[in-house]
Image (cartoon, rainbow, N blue to C red):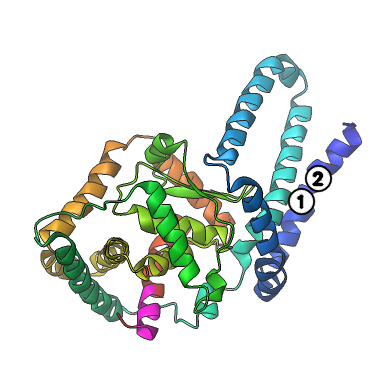
Amino acid sequence: MKNKLRNGIALSLIPQIIVVKWLAGHSDWIESFYSTGIYPWISEFFRYIFGWVPFSIGEIIYTILIVLVFRYIIQNRKKIKTKPFSFLRDIAMILSVFYFTFHLVWGLNYYRQPLSETMALKDKASYEEIKNLTETLVARTNALQLRITKDSTQMVQVPYTYNEIFKKTITSYNALDGSMPYLAYRRPSVKKSMFSKMSSYMGIGGYLNPFTNEAQVNKKTPVFRFPVVAAHEIGHQIGYAAENETNLIGYIVTQKNKDIYFQYSASAYALAYCLSAVHGTDKKEFEVLYARINEGVKKNYRELQNFHKAYENPFEPIFKSVFSTFLKANNQADGVKSYSRVVHLMVGYHEKYPL
């Protein structure tokens, strides 16, 4: 490739960033022309190509690229030292291609119309409203746990394999086609991540590969939490980028499943977020609410806590900081804290659709 072309591609990164930031101020355009226009065609095309493969093509591509990068650096280390500016130019060129491709195939969804507007939900809740929903969820989660186990002290053991959970989650999406057409999901492509152990150390429950539109879920995730995580990642696939929104989608899709284990998964998930929100405002009230939870539910929470503890490492905060910075750069000002903002959306959702 000639130097002029390399320079041009590298320099194009600057106008690309300007255009994307300009488009960020026109969410109605993004919604109409991209998120509900060309994106569904793009995403279904990739899922048609890769969805039938039982393993992740995207993760294989990532692995090959990482190996090639290290190989290139080792083989060209002397050239890199003698011509550092050329090396930096080539990095800028790669970043430019990545930036363009990322936003074309998925990234513009970060700037779409908020889901709260699509669903006509309020997106801010008071502490009292959050506490009231928490009380309702305590009762519901306890009731579901007791129905499943017949013993308030026994933890729930979900009797399904991960592939069975995927199938039930897809069925749940299909069941919502009529009432929530904005959650339409066709040509499924959801898979267990081959990098699940590494994801566990990084504190990742799952992710969407934007370049192949494959949803990957960490197969080491405790099974009682797995249905919501799978539904969350599919939420990204269908074009919702904001983490609080895909948290809500994951909750709704799982909660509306006819299977009681899925309903328990959703309820325990929502309760955990609401309890965390209460704890941040009133620790005494948190203790009162937590004391009302069945011991079996607490055992499931401890199972999840022990899972995270088993993979604690000094690098996890760094991974989270990098991811938080990525989210902030993509229209999510709260970074990783945006996940917890689902509590406000859940209050708005259940104000409109009471439990």
Quadrant the C terminus occupies:
bottom left
Residue 145 percent across, percent down from the top left:
18, 63
Badge 1 crowding class, 10 Å Cα cut-off, few under 14, some 14 to 19, many 20 or more, is: few
User: Tag 1, which secondary structure?
Assistant: helix
Is residue 17 rendered magenta in the image?
no
Amino acid residing under circle 1? Ile
**Residue 103 visible, this orientation:** no
User: Tag 2, which secondary structure?
Assistant: helix
Is mark 2 in CB contact (under 8 Å) with mark 1? yes
Pointer 1 residue: 14
Residue 277 or residue 196, whichever sits in front: 196
Amino acid residing under circle 2? Leu
Residue 135 or residue 341, whichever sits in front: 135
- The magenta span reads 346-353
Badge 2 crowding class, 10 Å Cα cut-off, few under 14, some 14 to 19, many 20 or more, is: some
Residue 42 percent across, percent down from the top left:
69, 57
Q: Which mark is residue 11?
A: 2
Is residue 349 rendered magenta in the image?
yes
**Residue at the image point whose x is 53% and y is 55% from the top:** 327
